[in-house]
Amino acid sequence: MKPKHIKDALLSEIHAVAVKSEEYCYNSQRDFSRKRKLSFESMLKTIIGMGSKSITNEMIDFFQASSEMPSASAFVQKRAIIKPEALKSVFDGFTQKFLTTPSDEMIILTVDGSDIQIPTNPQDESSYFQGSCYS
């Protein structure tokens, strides 16, 4: 499958959840009811697309340093009114698009590209690599 198809599937699922934003806000009558710089959909895209930079730098990247860029404080306040179930719904809907037979036994986890330090075990030849010592 091509990366563009995967990205399109993710964006489609984000949009599908955003259409039902009132289900995923703590105060459905008030939260995201007015047009602002940070819509519910843009919040989900930003949160999912974030790397390891500071919030301010992530916002600069997302809004391409536009004068319309909201403050980091505005982002944090908006993030606080979104229920965690919104991201779970995006994840579940996205993964269902790629499973041919959904199974409770097969759990799909997300991967963010971080390096994971595994415990050193000299007896495990598949993961243990002797480093070089510098004296």
Image: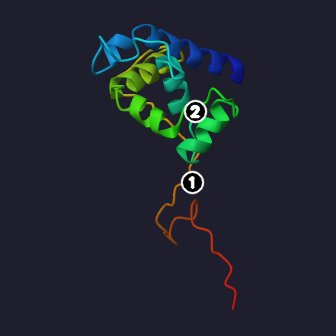
- Nearer to us of marks 1 and 2 is 2
Asked which secondary structure carries label 1, the reply is: loop
Q: CA distance from mark 1 to mark 2?
A: 18 Å
| Helix, strand or loop at mark 2 | helix
Instruction: From the top left corner, tell me how far across and down residue 26 is, in percent.
Output: 28, 21
> How is the model colour-coded?
rainbow
Q: Nearer the viewer, residue 101 or 133?
A: 133
Front position in the image: 41 or 96 = 41
Kind of residue at badge 2: Gly
Badge number at residue 115: 1
Q: Residues within 10 Å of mark 2 (few under 14, many from 20)?
A: few
- Residue 91 lies in what quarter of the image? top left
Q: Which residue is mark 2?
A: 49
The C terminus lies in quadrant? bottom right
Residue 60: quarter of image: top right
User: Relative to 76, does residue 94 appear above or below in the rendering?
Assistant: above
**Residue 2 visible within the image:** no
Residue 87 lies, in percent from the top left, at 42, 26
**Residue sitting at 32 percent across and 14 percent down?**
30
Q: Say left or right for 58 vs 123.
A: right
Q: Is residue 27 something one can see in this rendering?
A: yes
- Looking at the rendered structure, the kind of residue marked 1 is Asp
Kindly identify the residue that appears in the image at 65 percent across and 29 percent down. 63
Residue 134 x, y percent position in the rendering: 70, 86
